[in-house]
Amino acid sequence: MPCSACWSPGCSSATGFRANGSSTASIDLPFALPTAVAGIALTTIYAPTGWVGSLFKPLGLKIAYTPIGITIALIFIGLPFVVRTVQPVLQDLEKDVEEAAVMLGAYRWRTFRRVILPELIAPLLTGFALAFARGIGEYGSVVFISGNMPLKTEIAPLLIMTKLEQFDYAGATAIALVMLVISFALLLLINYMQWRYSRRVQAG
Amino acid sequence: MAGAIHAQLSDAASDRPAHVTERRGVRIALITVALLFLALVILLPLASVIVEALSQGWRVYVESIAEKDAVSALRLTLVTAAIAVPLNTIFGVAAAWAIAKFSFRGKNVLITLIDLPFAVSPVISGLIFVLLFGAQGLLGPWLAAHDIKIIFALPGIVLATIFVTFPFVARELIPLMQAQGVQEEEAAATLGAKGWQIFWRVTLPNIRWGLLYGIILCNARAMGEFGAVSVVSGHIRGQTNTLPLQVEILYNEYQFTASFAVASLLVLLALVTLIVKSIVEWKSEQRTVGSEGGTG
């Protein structure tokens, strides 16, 4: 069966939209595109002179070289993690369950909220944690768009780089250690979610 | 565009009866939002690389790519991938084989360790090797005494790349091999096949599409890795610059056209990766459909 572009919980496979191959493949682009390339491309578009940045300039809104730009880079990097974790679960969801909900008098929105959404909480959290872990450590795609202003748009990995260039190994390691602790906590959370999910599937 | 979506919608309507699907307006709204988001965040950057690279015409583009430092960066990237990808392929198959087909103590620890490079920042991955092999590092004095250069040289770049791309093949194969179970191998063993024979004749053909997929992803990351390699490379022009590092240097020197020209090579790599990936997915889907038909 052709795969649906069920890439957000709202746009579920239930909408019946069959993604042509190109939009399915383009979701994986952030996985395949080197981060440095993504970085310079996003910066060029969202800079005040860029395709999108120039549209927001008259509104007095700066995107590149601000936290908004950093956020956009992290959305780009994190998107496929959430899509690819939620998608298989949505596809495996039995249509019968939704039909049963309709038979019992639930409207579509209620079916989504009470029947579909609860199934998606585990994969959504897993996807969130994966994207979050990646976002914390991300360097290549952010370093160009962030502008690197100390205390304003300087991200932790860049701080490690700066300290390394000054041969401050102790300082770099200290920051790295804090980031490692966060990564491990997230890894534990992901493993726990997957363990719980597989247990529930086996029980059901 | 709207026409195409329209056709797809009505086509899919036969899939799901009206009572278990969204109203038409809701469906169109959701799909529009999704496609718009996709265009804004993903397709636009891709287009901008090509446009910027060609903004001063073909001649400048070709000259930028044929430039001495760019060629040496390309060579270094290819050499690094040529070492890292096969090593990680061998490791990935071995690890997936061990995890999926056998049970042993510490299996969960091994699985978590394989995942580790995914959870760690690339900058930290590079830092690990600097702390280990750098001049002030644990093994630094010994390496200096024996005149072995690892950091700021090819071995460091290869090591960092191997570390970062470590999980790709194994991650792809473990669920696949777990799902396939051990029956076929056991059958082969009862028919008198030896260990290697079982691997080449039974296991490998069963996992070949998943393996190919893992190798492609591993290769894409190996060629495109930026953060980890940036820490260990030292940015010596013409010597320790990989393609992504060359992109960064040119960009920071405001040589935008040249930077995007080199970046376009990496875009090409990404597109080839996605195309091969789609073919592999299509092939393996066909395979499962075919085998389901066979048993049914």
Image: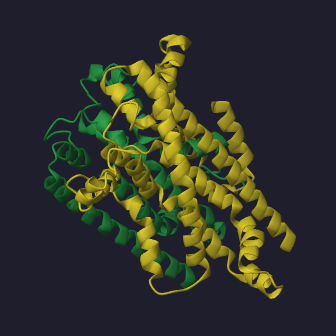
Chain colours: A green, B yellow
* Closer to the camera in the image, B40 or B48: B48
* Closer to the camera in the image, B289 or B129: B129
Rendered location of residue B241, percent (x, y) = 39, 36
Q: Is residue B35 above or below residue B211?
A: above
Rendered location of residue A121, percent (x, y) = 44, 66
Q: Is residue B15 above or below residue A103?
A: above
Specify whether A192 is left or right of B196.
Answer: left
Rendered location of residue B257, percent (x, y) = 43, 19
Q: Is residue A169 above or below residue B71?
A: below
Residue located 80% across and 88% down the image? B190
* Closer to the camera in the image, A123 or A188: A188
Count all numbered tags in the image, as a single digit. Answer: 0
Work out which residue is located at the far front of the displayed protein and give it. Answer: B146
Rendered location of residue A55, percent (x, y) = 36, 22
Image quadrant assignment for residue B274: top right
Specify whether B175 is left or right of A73.
Answer: right
Q: Is residue B96 above or below residue A67?
A: below
Q: Looking at the rendering, in which quadrant would you find the N terminus of chain A?
A: bottom right
* Closer to the camera in the image, B154 or A22: B154
Residue located 49% across and 13% down the image? B60
Image quadrant assignment for residue A185: bottom left
Residue located 27% across and 23% down the image? A59
Q: Looking at the rendering, in which quadrant would you find the C terminus of chain A?
A: bottom right
Specify whether A92 is left or right of B162.
Answer: right
